[in-house]
Amino acid sequence: MFKYTLDNKRYHTLNYFYKNKFNSKVFKVSLNANFSCPNFKNGTGCIFCSNGSGNNYQHLDLLEQFNLVKIPLDKKWPNSKYIAYFQANSNTYAPLDVLKEKYESVLQIPNVIGLSIATRSDCLNDEILDYLEELNKRTFLTVEIGLQSMHDKTLKMINRGHDLKNFESAIKELKKRNIFTVVHIINGLPNETKEMMIQTVKYLNSLNIDGIKIHMLYVTKNTKLANMYETDTFHILTKEEYIDIVCEQLEYLDENIVIERITGDPIKEELIEPSWLLKKFCVLNDIDKEMKKRDIYQGDKI
C-alpha cells in the first residue's frame, strides 16, 4: 500500500495528511466572507467563472455559516477539529484590517486549528504576506493559489488577468515564509493538449508546492465559457480522457505533494457539460481502478 494513504489510494491523500499531522478527524468548513476579485472589473472575469464560488450563505455572518456545518458534525464526531476555509472569490483582496477581522474571528471558534485561504497570485502584496507569515506561526495556515495552466497563451485566452511570472513570484514569496501552499489547475481548457497539461504538473513539481487541486473543466450557465461553447463548440474531455491525463499527471508529481482534490464538483442545476462529472465517486473510483490496472503510484516518473 502507498505510504501516504489510509484508504488504499495510490496517491497522497488529504485524509492521510490531516490524520498524520493532527491525529484527529479534520473537516474543512467552506465560508463566504463576501470578498470580491480584481478580475470582476467591468463585468469581466475568468471565462469559466460565474462570479463566485463556495457556499451560498454570504448573507450570514461567519460564525453562523460555520455552525451550520460544525454543529451536525460535532454530533457524529464530537472530538473533531476544523479548518476554516475561506473559499469564495479572492480572499486576500481587501485592506489588511478587513482581512485581520475576518480571519481572527474564526480562529476564536473552539477546535478550529487552521485557516485555508483561497486567493490569486495578484492579490498578495508585501503587507499581506508579512501578516500571513505572522499568522502562520499561530495556526496551521494554507494558502491556495489558482493557476489553472502554466501556459501564458492559455492564461490570456481564459482571461486570467495575470501571467505565469506573477504566479511564480507569489509562490516563491509564500514558500520563503514557510507557508503551506496549494495550487489549483484545470484539465481540459480549450486548445490545451494532453502534453500541455502534463507540462503544467511538471512545472509545479519544480516549485516545492505542498498540495494541488486538480479540476476538470466544466461548462456552467451564465458564463463566457458557456457562450463560447454554444457559438463554437470545443472539445470537452471524456471521462476516459480525463482519467488517463490525471493518472499520468500523478506519476509526475512528487509523492510528498498532497492531492487535495482530483476532480470537479459542479452544481447539477448549473451544469451544461460534461454530465459524467456529476458522478463524482464514480470518477474517483475509476481513477483508482486505472492506477491499479497500470500498477502506478504518485511520483513514479520522477
Image: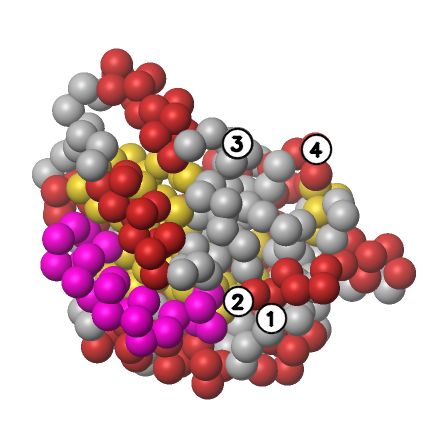
Q: CA distance from mark 4 to mark 1?
A: 25 Å
Q: Residue 212 vs residue 5: left or right? A: right
Q: CA distance from mark 1 to mark 3?
A: 28 Å
Q: Which one is earlier in the sequence, the residue at label 4 or at label 1?
A: 1
Q: Height in image: 106 above or below 110? A: below
**From the image, which quarter does the C terminus lie in?**
bottom left
- Please name the residue that numbered disc 4 is placed on: 269
Residue beneath label 1, please?
160
Residues shaded magenta: 120-141
Label 2 Cα neighbours within 10 Å, binned few <14 / some 14-19 / many ≥20: many
Of callouts 2 and 3, the N-terminal one: 3
Identify the mark at residue 148; answer none if there is no mark: 2
- Tell me how far mark 4 sits from mark 3, CA to CA: 21 Å
Identity, as a three-letter code, of the amino acid under mark 1: Arg
Q: Which mark is residue 11?
A: none
Q: Earlier in the sequence, mark 4 or mark 2?
A: 2
Q: Are marks 1 and 3 in contact (CB under 8 Å)?
A: no
- The residue under the point 52% across, 31% down is 59
The image shows residue 234 at horizontal and vertical percentages of 78, 63
- Dot 4 falls on a residue whose secondary structure is helix
Residue 151: name its quadrant.
Answer: bottom right
Residue 178 found in image quarter: bottom left
